[in-house]
């Protein structure tokens, strides 16, 4: 029992179970969300950039951390880099639109402080992201003989 908890935790971290993926995704999301919020606050409060433009810049600045963390840690993709990155970019183009719409709704339509727009973005976008990343962007694909090197050297028809 000495290593029971450590063994269990190690197994959970390397698991492909949906709940475990969601927890790992949440960890990366927390880092990305903190980066988004920090950049947004600096741009709005210190530099004087408008809240919607600041949200767009902040979102884009968090993308490299988000891609690398989710590809390697959350979903452990073994897919080719370019197709994974292409799907990720399409997803995030949609999410950038969601981020700007949520900020615009809060600031322009409701007349509320931009930080609530940032909070809405931090809630809405990850829900869309998890589903899309799990079932589309980093989805485990069947291996075929032409892609055997990516699949551990053994092609499966």
Image: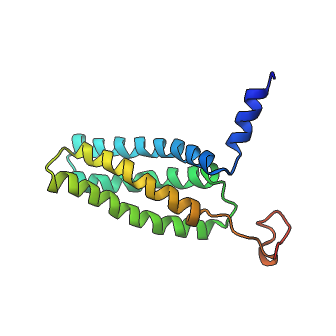
The picture places residue 129, in percent across and down from the top left corner, at 47, 57
The correct choice, above or below, for 11 with respect to 134 in the image is above
The correct choice, above or below, for 144 with respect to 131 in the image is below
One can see residue 50 in this view? no
Residue at the (31%, 49%) spot, across then down: 120
The correct choice, above or below, for 45 with respect to 78 in the image is above
Residue at the (35%, 43%) spot, across then down: 37
Left or right: 115 in relation to 86: left
Quarter occupied by residue 103? bottom left
The picture places residue 16, in percent across and down from the top left corner, at 68, 51
Q: Nearer the viewer, residue 6 or 90?
A: 6
Q: Nearer the viewer, residue 38 or 138?
A: 138
One can see residue 119 in this view? yes
Q: Which of the image's four quarters has the N terminus?
A: top right
Q: Which of the image's four quarters has the C terminus?
A: bottom right
Quarter occupied by residue 147? bottom right
Residue at the (70%, 61%) spot, across then down: 78
Residue at the (33%, 64%) spot, across then down: 97
Looking at this rendering, what residue extends furthest in the top direction?
2
The picture places residue 126, in percent across and down from the top left corner, at 44, 52
How many numbered circles are shown? 0
Q: How is colour applied across the structure in the image?
A: rainbow
């Amino acid at each position: 029992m000495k290593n029971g908890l450590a063994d269990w935790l190690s197994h959970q971290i390397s698991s492909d179970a949906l709940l475990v993926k969601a927890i790992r995704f949440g960890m990366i999301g927390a880092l990305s969300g903190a980066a988004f919020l920090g950049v947004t606050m600096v741009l709005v409060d210190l530099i004087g950039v408008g809240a919607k433009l600041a949200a767009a810049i902040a979102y884009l600045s968090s993308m490299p951390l988000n891609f690398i963390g989710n590809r390697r840690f959350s979903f452990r993709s073994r897919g080719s880099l370019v197709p994974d990155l292409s799907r990720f970019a399409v997803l995030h183009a949609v999410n950038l639109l969601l981020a700007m719409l949520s900020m615009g709704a809060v600031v322009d339509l409701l007349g509320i402080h931009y930080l609530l727009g940032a909070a809405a973005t931090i809630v809405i976008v990850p829900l869309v992201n998890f589903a899309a990343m799990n079932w589309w962007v980093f989805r485990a694909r069947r291996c075929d003989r032409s892609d055997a090197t990516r699949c551990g050297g053994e092609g499966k028809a």
